[in-house]
Amino acid sequence: MGCGSCSTGGGCAPAGCKSNGSCLTGGCGKMEVYDWLSNLDMPSNYKPFPIIEVKFKGARKEFFVNHDNIYLEIGELVAVEGPTGGYDIGHVSLTGELVRMQMKRRKTNADQVTRKVYRKATEADVEKWKVAKSMEWETMHKARTLALDLRLSMKISDVDYQGDKTKATFFYTAEGRVDFRELIKKMAEAFRIRIEMRQIGMRQEAGRLGGIGSCGRELCCSTWLTNFKTVSTAAARYQNLSLNTLKLAGQCGKLKCCLNYELDTYLDALKDIPDRVDSLQTEIGVARHQKTDIFKKLMWFSYPNTEDWIPLKVDRVKEIMAMNKKGQKPVNLKEEAVELVTTAVLDKIPDYENVVGQDSLTRLDDKPRNKGNKNNRNNQNRNKNNAERNDKTARPDKQPKPAQQIKNRPEGNKKENVNAGQPGGNAGAQPGTGQANGGQPSGNRNNRNRNNRRKKPTDKPTK
């Protein structure tokens, strides 16, 4: 469960609170109890049960006496008496008659409950409690560093500060006995608080830290499981599970507690299954036992050098075993095989098909570009620019000139202006230049001369 879907209220922290009490409930749905007596009307002379149940970090629950008859509801923060002095902050998990039933289940007498409820938690109490909780992560890592410096074979897995920030409980795991007297002195000097060391097992550590199991759900030990029963490999053997420690072990390194959940059901079903059926004697050979389906009550056998498995009912296996004891043998087990019903999947055309997200997987791949289109586009742009430039420099249509007598030009490098003094000629041209307007070149004549200088394909190269 995550804080994103939390419905307990109380101003949840950002997602991933790690069940450390950031949402003021000690975890989302962790060891929650449903009050099925909340909708019942109590008699007018009913006296509430004076003991309440308070939950703390790590699924720790304790009973306290409400001497002042303070009206409390489930989920409220209260200040209660600490185990060694001071006060602690927790939230109410049970009130009323449910507490009496819970104490009976835990075999706790009312006379054994001595610690009392001080008051409802004030704003100052809550702020101080939040500051203490924010120091737990840093304190745990510093304590680990001190333990490594002293070369102690122990692992500090969690730290729980008291609500008044005067005491901290360090939970650790170790394979053997650890002498941590020097460690306590150094931690007391570093943190300036009272230190309590408490050793827990591997399963308790997994329950405090929490996590996700191989089934995809939260660990049972961190949500609802409180009694840890012994789990043996016989539980896996009865359920026909492979004895693979990697698959059978949980996050604590021990065998999964869920192996005991269905063990009783398997034991009841195994009463009808014959024991120690290794082989069956037939006339064509010995059939070896391969596997058993406990709930369908089917057993598979196979002959040597064959890959076919023959399913038989449990009752028929018992009959063949009785025949073998009398020295009798059936002809062939294949004649007595059970026909297994297989469900065929029919290919049906759906009336509606959701095509969202069914695009081609190669739609984002680089496709080859057509370079010819790019060249054609560039040629079109170049022709368009030339046309615009010619339109800007174009002159209005000229009047037709009168017929002029073409004279033979003298040989030489210079050209004479034959149009000088003629109508429409270049009156202002300088002699020997062939240019008018004070020597300024004519645009049309220059273009014509430039075209004349171009060689034709039929022209022969000059030697």
Image (cartoon, rainbow, N blue to C red):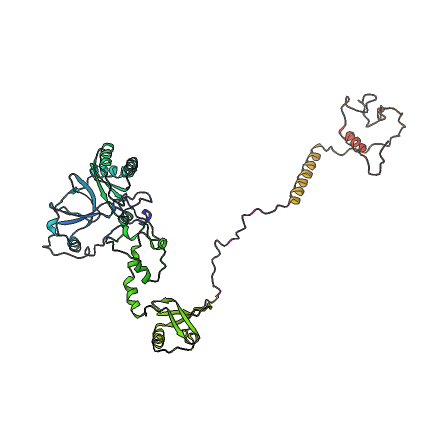
Q: Could you tell me residue 389's position as x and y percent? A: 69, 34
Q: Quadrant of residue 97?
A: bottom left
Q: Could you tell me residue 233's position as x and y percent? A: 31, 58
Total numbered labels: 0
Q: Which stretch appears magenta?
A: 348-370
State left or right for residue 235 relative to residue 113: right
Q: Nearer the viewer, residue 254 or 330?
A: 330
Q: Is residue 276 above or below residue 433?
A: below
State left or right for residue 151 relative to residue 96: right
- Quadrant of the drawing holding the C terminus: top right
Q: Nearer the viewer, residue 322 or 202?
A: 322
The residue that appears at 29% across and 55% down in the rendered structure is 257
State left or right for residue 283 relative to residue 107: right
Q: Is-magenta flag for residue 414?
A: no
Q: Is residue 207 above or below residue 449?
A: below
Q: Nearer the viewer, residue 147 or 123?
A: 147
Residue 340 visible in rendering: no
Q: Is-magenta flag for residue 351?
A: yes
Q: Quadrant of residue 381?
A: top right
